[in-house]
Amino acid sequence: MKKKIVVLTGAGISAESGLKTFRDADGLWEGYNVMDVATPDAWERNPELVQRFYNERRKQVLAAQPNEAHLLLTKLEEEFDVSIITQNIDDLHERAGSANITHLHGIITYAQSSKKASLVYPIEGDEIKMGELCKWGSQLRPHVVWFGEAVPMIEKAAEICAQADIFVLIGTSLAVYPAAGLIDYVPKAVPKYIIDPKIPPVAGLGNVIRIEKSATEGMKELVAILGLN
């Protein structure tokens, strides 16, 4: 039986592929107030703006490439049973070749019904057009969990974390809930490797190994620690 590694990734791993983190220090995302583009109310007020915003983000994602940190995560699968839980809405883990990925906040290369979130479709091309409808006649919107919406995969993610033999946190500040609370489901005795240039507060967790580096440099160190060089 292979040991199980559970990895929780955030915006820091995608930043090395040129994708901006979800919110800048000023609270803006690509120059937009997140309340204007990432809430159900924003969609009700101005669906054309929201659709255009995510179409632009999708094009950026499709133009980006997985970086070395993404690729090193696939290397872990040589010796371990690896489950990746990501807060990111890009598909870079998939394109890097990781086999088992749970997207907490949706994935931007898919569309969903604006009335029933579980009705999901892959997007052909790089845009969702106004007037494109689900099978029940509702406008398609980005398959992204917005502020104020439920996180449907959170219970599955908590179950995965509880099964970890090794836990790895990469590129997240643990500031966005409920995702930030997932680390609390990891058994206390399990080693928890935290890779980030600025390690978030993790007092009281137990068995924390801090790797204060970028995602790529931190993953190189982790691969060496785990004897996969």
Image (cartoon, rainbow, N blue to C red):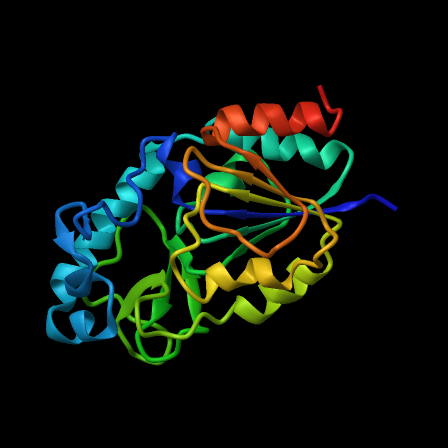
Q: Can residue 68 be seen at all in this image of the molecule? A: no
**Residue 63's x, y, as percent?**
32, 33
Residue at 24%, 53% (x, y): give it. 54
Residue at the image position 32 percent from the left and 31 percent from the top: 18
* Residue toward you, 91 or 85: 85
Residue at 26% x, 57% y is 128
Q: Is residue 60 left or right of residue 53?
A: right
- Farthest-out residue, front: 204
Q: Quadrant of residue 82?
A: top right
What residue is drawn where x is 51% and y is 24%? Answer: 217
Residue 118 falls left or right of residue 74: left
Residue 165 percent coordinates (x, y): 75, 49
Residue 78 higher or lower than 1, as above or below: above
**Which percent across, then down, holds residue 121?**
42, 62
| Quarter of the image where the C terminus is located | top right
Q: Is residue 105 at all visible to an observer of this figure?
A: yes
